[in-house]
Image (cartoon, rainbow, N blue to C red):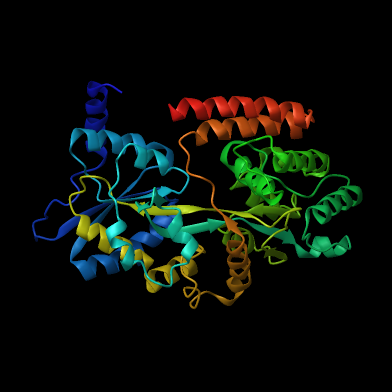
Amino acid sequence: MTIQRLFLLASMVFLVFPAGCAKKADNAKTLSVVMGLAEEEWKVMRENIFPEFEKQYQCRVRHFQVEAGDFSKKLEAMVRAGNVTVDVFSQDNMRLAVLVNKDLVEDLSAYESVVPAEVLPAMREVGRFNGKLFFMPYRPNVQIAYYNEKRLEEAGLEPPQTWDELLHVARVLKEKKGMGKVGFQAWGDGPTTAQLYEFIVSAGGDPLLLNDTGCGKAFAFLKTLYPYLSPDSKKAKWDTTNTYLANESFYLAQNWPFGVRIVMRDYGKKEIKTYRGWRGPVREAHVIGGEVFGIPKGAQDKTLALAFIRYFQSKEVQEKLAARLGWPSIRDDAYGNMADWLKPHYRSVKEALEHGVYRPNVPYWDEFDKLLNEAFLRIVVQQGDVGEILNAYHEEMEGIKREYSR
């Protein structure tokens, strides 16, 4: 990227992010925070989370919405121009490598000891690169399985615990209902990749190889399963899956825990229950998603930014986020204030996290995501040859890896 281009981007960013810690008239500091949230989530932040921090630290939190995929370019422009107007940001845990590789974030290794002991050990590791801690946890996520208890019971079925049982449930439901009632997020992109990743790891495979034995087993199984799935699987992703569960297009499907409040509370579908899901032929595996906090290189108030991160990791804040938004917690002691009806669902979350797996933070993830989705389309949807197609994509993926290693 040319210097002129960087400065142009930087000037555009400054219009979005005012100076991060400029003094107000009353001498209170302003902390500029970037997050990517839905409006319901922002409402809870504004009304229930930020005010107490502002009171404790005699400051003002200025918050800005930036989607995860857009932030790295904006931050690079600011850092290169030497005018960083963001003090702390949240970022999807799959988009961290580029920030570290481009030297855009502070090394927080010296502050690791302030992370509360109650924070789950696995939550810390995603922010570590080459032995150094660059990001701190604040919001984990993991997929769980939703099922319509009433409809499964009517069909004489139990929630599946293995791949074989999943295939059996899908077949029986299609036979009895005339169409598939098991859902898969086959819309494409990230939603499809997340579910494929789980199946491959559950079969003992390395998804980034694309053609090892585990990859082959996973694609062969999904190819067999696909004809028995709900036709709405082609349109299913993280948001539409909730609708399909509520309107009973899906009797069984995986999704992130935020759907619990939408499906059970907003749609009133009390007959829908959750559990951690099924295991594959080798192991049980559930992708851990979520977000972490980072501090940009050149942030104007690193001390206040660290205080903000610690505040979000506290039991009090984690309890509020779990109770008000239904977010999983980075702590195992943060579910005390949760409504009784939510507790069974968050047992599902906790159990899924115990079998959680992180996807690797590699610089070629976008290319991998594209190839994996193409393989899914050709093999599973179009019922193509598993070995031939995966071998071709393996060769293409290896070429991409070599390009990045130069």
Q: Is residue 180 left or right of residue 205?
A: right
Q: Nearer the viewer, residue 358 or 381?
A: 358
Q: Residue at x 20, y 33 (%)?
A: 81
Q: Give percent across and percent down for residue 194.
A: 60, 45
Q: Give percent across and percent down for residue 208.
A: 59, 38
Q: Residue at x 70, y 65 (%)?
A: 273
Q: Residue at x 20, y 67 (%)?
A: 57
Q: Is residue 303 left or right of residue 220?
A: left
- What is the count of numbered marks? 0
Q: Is residue 389 left or right of residue 340?
A: right
Q: Give percent across and percent down for residue 380.
A: 75, 35
| In the rendered image, the vertical position of residue 381 relative to residue 25, given as above or below | above
Residue 59 is drawn in which quadrant?
A: bottom left
Q: Is residue 388 left or right of residue 99?
A: right
Task: Locate the N terminus by quadrant.
Answer: top left
Q: Residue at x 58, y 62 (%)?
A: 353
Q: Nearer the viewer, residue 358 or 157?
A: 358
| In the rendered image, the vertical position of residue 299 relative to residue 259, given as above or below | above
